[in-house]
Image (cartoon, rainbow, N blue to C red):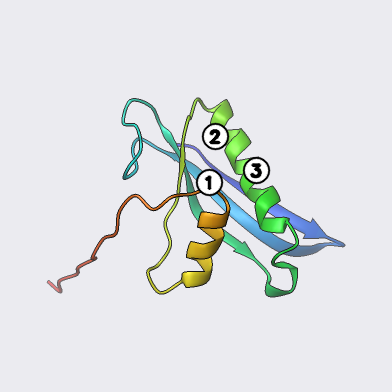
Amino acid sequence: MPVVVFVAEQDHAILGFLEAALRSTADGCDVSCPVGYVEGWYVIEARRGQGVGRALLRGAENWARQQGCREMASDADIDNTLSQRVHEASGFTVTARSVLYRKSL
């Protein structure tokens, strides 16, 4: 599946990035078509709250629409409450919570 990275920069300095991909499915999304997925999203602290992240997300959403997606999905670590607030302020809704496991072999 394709992956694209959007970068915000000013005066040759990177302000933030958003990596988006297509996934065949995502929790809580329609399984009949691919889903745009935010794989990584970061804005430097000094530029947060100034629309940089919003612009990066708009670019990713437009790209996903061009790929035939009707939905965008993402995830955030349960301890990353800032990311959760940003996602929800950007129109994302919580669809599930998971417990992750590992086992040494």
C-alpha separation, residue under disc 1 versus residue under disc 3: 11 Å
Residue 38: give x, y in percent of width and height: 50, 50
First reached walking from the N terminus: tag 1 or tag 3: 1
Q: Residues within 10 Å of mark 1 (few under 14, many from 20)?
A: many
Residue highlighted by disc 3: 58
Looking at the rendered structure, the secondary structure element under dot 3 is: helix
Looking at the rendered structure, the secondary structure element under dot 1 is: strand
- State the quadrant of the C terminus: bottom left
Q: Amino acid at mark 3?
A: Arg
- State the quadrant of the N terminus: top left
Above or below, comparing residue 69 to residue 18 in the picture:
above
Residue highlighted by disc 1: 20
Q: Amino acid at mark 1?
A: Ala
| Residue situated in front as seen by the camera: 40 or 105 | 40
**Label 1–label 2 contact, CB within 8 A:** yes
Q: Amino acid at mark 2?
A: Ala
Above or below, comparing residue 95 to residue 22 in the picture:
below
Q: From the viewer's perspective, is 36 left or right of 45?
A: left
Residue highlighted by disc 2: 64
Quarter-wise, where is residue 22 in the image?
top left
Quarter-wise, where is residue 45 in the image?
bottom right
C-alpha separation, residue under disc 3 versus residue under disc 2: 10 Å
First reached walking from the N terminus: tag 1 or tag 2: 1
First reached walking from the N terminus: tag 3 or tag 2: 3
| Residue situated in front as seen by the camera: 102 or 95 | 95
